[in-house]
Amino acid sequence: MYPPPHHQVDDIDKMIAVIKQYPLGMLVSVKDNKPFLTHIPFIYNAKTGRLVAHIDKNNPQLETLQNGTSVTVVFKGPDCYISPSIYDSEDQLPTWNYIITHVTGNIRLIKNPEAAKQSMIAMTKFLEKSEHKFVLHKDNPKMERFVNYIQAFEIEITNWEGKFKLSQDKSEVDQANAKDTLIKKSGASISGFIKIIYDK
């Protein structure tokens, strides 16, 4: 992604935090110079270090996804307009702060129906946290039908890229003001996530 370097993040744990908090990723692939994009949820498997997801078999993007295909997934965290009025220092201009993670890797199709079901169960468990009002069981009769309509896959990650534009070029006071604005506009529920992102 475009520099400047002070907006670039190399901390993989922080990028994983973005994926966990904002799991709806934009899957990007290319075939015959034509880009394909689909918005689908992903989970990060800490044991394998891979992303896991599934796509509708009727989605034309599936034709671009073969074993070994290189793809990129974009995860968009919170973002907001930053007014110069929030800064203590003068001579500032309006800007837009945001948290973005790009993950590039290679596709590995999950052909085994039982493994595909397990990936659906794992994703449901993650997305239902922390209340877990619904539990997807392997013997759910709907699973037998549904698994035939999706293609599960993993992405073996080859590159991580984070761009967290958080007014890092401003004073500490102004950075804190920008942080408070991001939380206020995104909702107090992300305050824990923001603490992870800002933690040195």
Image: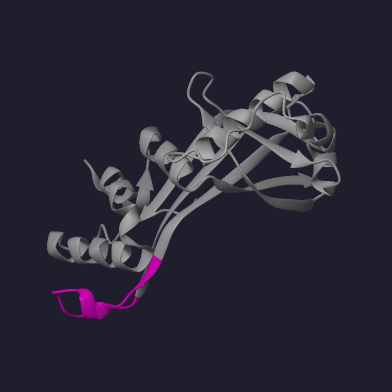
Query: Does the rendering let one see residue 106?
Result: no
Q: Is residue 132 above or below residue 169?
A: above
Image quarter where the C terminus lies is: top left
Q: Position of residue 62 (x, y in %)?
A: 81, 41
Query: Does the rendering let one see residue 128?
Result: yes
Is 87 displayed left or right of 58 in the figure?
left
- Snapshot colouring: one colour
Q: Position of residue 45 (x, y in %)?
A: 53, 26
Name the residue rendered at 37%, 52% in the picture.
164
Q: Is residue 96 above or below residue 93?
A: above
Name the residue rendered at 80%, 46% in the picture.
61
Q: Position of residue 139 (x, y in %)?
A: 72, 23
User: Is 110 or 177 nearer to us in this picture?
Assistant: 110
Q: Is residue 13 above or below residue 31?
A: above
Is 164 displayed left or right of 92 in the figure?
right
Is 38 displayed left or right of 156 in the figure?
right
The reply to whether the magenta stretch includes residue 191 is no
Q: Position of residue 71 (x, y in %)?
A: 67, 39
Name the residue rendered at 14%, 74% in the picture.
89
Residue 180 picture quarter = bottom left
The residue segment tinted magenta is: 80-94
User: Is 143 or 26 nearer to us in this picture?
Assistant: 143
Name the residue rendered at 68%, 47% in the picture.
28
Numbered marks: total: 0
Q: Main secondary structure of the magenta part?
A: loop
